[in-house]
């Protein structure tokens, strides 16, 4: 069994679609998160979004994942 301590967790939360464009809220910056590996976000509008997570070790990305999120009316 392996135990990992997350030291470098980075996130990208991306708002996409027409509503995001019209609202000038296209996001996509990558930012460093907490070592819990948990990210809580709120949304200002409906539509398609996605979240990416990057785990970095020794300045190299070793794991990535992406989920699509559709926020409905």
Image (cartoon, rainbow, N blue to C red):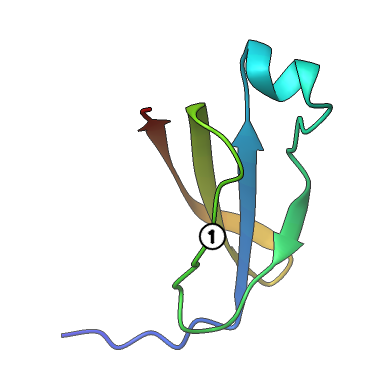
Question: 35 left or right of 70?
Answer: right
Residue at x-position 49% and y-position 67%: 40
Residue at x-position 64% and y-position 48%: 12
Q: Quadrant of the C terminus?
A: top left
- Of residues 55 and 12, the one nearer the viewer is 12
- Of residues 42 and 63, the one nearer the viewer is 42
- Of residues 21 and 37, the one nearer the viewer is 21
From what the image shows, is residue 34 above or below residue 52? below
Element type at mark 1: loop
Q: Residues within 10 Å of mark 1 (few under 14, many from 20)?
A: few
Residue at x-position 73% and y-position 38%: 28
| Quarter assignment of residue 7 | bottom right
From what the image shows, is residue 3 above or below residue 16? below
Q: Quadrant of the N terminus?
A: bottom left
Query: In this figure, which residue is indicated by the disc labeled 1?
Result: 41
Residue 53, x across and y down, in percent = 52, 53
Residue 57, x across and y down, in percent = 61, 70
Residue at x-position 45% and y-position 88%: 5
Residue lying at the far front of the rendered structure: 73
């Amino acid at each position: 069994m392996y135990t990992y301590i997350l030291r470098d967790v980075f996130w990208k939360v991306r708002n996409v679609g027409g509503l995001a464009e019209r609202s000038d809220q296209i996001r996509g910056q990558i930012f460093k998160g907490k070592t819990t590996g948990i990210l809580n976000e709120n949304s200002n509008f409906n539509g398609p979004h996605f979240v990416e997570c990057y785990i970095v070790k020794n300045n190299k990305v070793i794991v990535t994942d992406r989920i699509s999120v559709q926020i409905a009316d």
